């Protein structure tokens, strides 16, 4: 059995209030903390165009913006990025591609280490090892 004393009040509770604009949001008669979706939030100085979500704090009667929609589909260009490196995207791509490229990679690939002594080898042969005292 469904207890209609509980079902009716719960079905009439909005989890998010809706307002067509900021003036309508401000006119909401709220008796507790709330969240509101404002379809046209452009009257808010922090929103140039589009919608926004707000949190209403009943104790201070203050609205706080949670999020706005105008930057959801933001597309930046390299020139618009602040604090970017001085290198161009092409220079960065080249550096990444060549991060392990060496003109002498065939020589470097033949270098190794002797397991017993830890000394340098080339093509499996131990290279001459000497100390400064031997000079």
Image: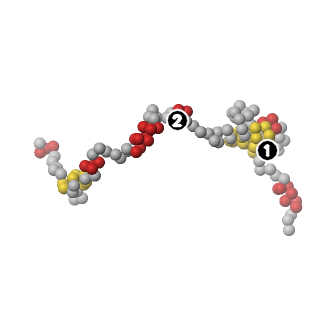
Label 2 crowding class (10 Å Cα cut-off): few <14, some 14-19, many 20+?
A: few
The residue at 78%/37% (across/down) is 21
Mark toward the start of the polypeptide (1 vs 2):
1
Towards the viewer: 12 or 19: 19
Q: Residue furthest right?
A: 4
Residue receiving disc 2:
78
Helix, strand or loop at label 1? It is: strand
1 and 2 marks in contact (CB < 8 Å):
no
The quarter of the displayed image where residue 10 is located: bottom right
Left or right, 128 with reference to 26: left
Left or right, 82 with reference to 15: left
x, y (%) of residue 33?
77, 45
Q: Residue furthest left?
A: 135
Residue 57 in view here? no
Towards the viewer: 129 or 83: 83
Q: Nearer the viewer, mark 1 or mark 2?
A: 2
Q: Which residue lies furthest to the top in this view?
A: 45
Residue receiving disc 1:
18
Q: Quadrant of the N terminus?
A: bottom right
x, y (%) of residue 90?
44, 38
The quarter of the displayed image where residue 135 is located: top left
x, y (%) of residue 18?
79, 44
The residue at 44%/34% (across/down) is 87
Helix, strand or loop at label 2? It is: helix
Residue 112 in view here? yes
The residue at 68%/41% (across/down) is 69
Label 1 crowding class (10 Å Cα cut-off): few <14, some 14-19, many 20+?
A: some
- Which circle marks residue 120 in the picture? none
x, y (%) of residue 14?
80, 50
Find the distance from the CA under tag 1 to the CA under tag 2: 37 Å
Left or right, 10 with reference to 103: right
């Amino acid at each position: 059995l469904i207890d209609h004393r509980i079902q009716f009040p719960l079905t009439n509770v909005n989890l998010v209030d809706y307002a067509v604009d900021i003036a309508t949001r401000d006119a909401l008669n709220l008796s507790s903390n709330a969240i509101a979706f404002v379809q046209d939030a452009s009257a808010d100085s922090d929103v140039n165009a589009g919608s926004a979500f707000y949190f209403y704090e009943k104790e201070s009667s203050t609205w706080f913006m949670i999020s706005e929609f105008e930057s959801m589909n933001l597309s930046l260009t390299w020139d618009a990025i602040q604090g970017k490196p001085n290198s161009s995207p092409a220079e960065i791509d080249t550096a990444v591609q060549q991060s392990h490229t060496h003109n002498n990679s065939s020589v470097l690939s033949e270098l190794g280490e002797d397991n017993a002594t830890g000394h340098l080898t080339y093509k499996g042969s131990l290279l001459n090892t000497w100390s400064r005292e031997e000079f």
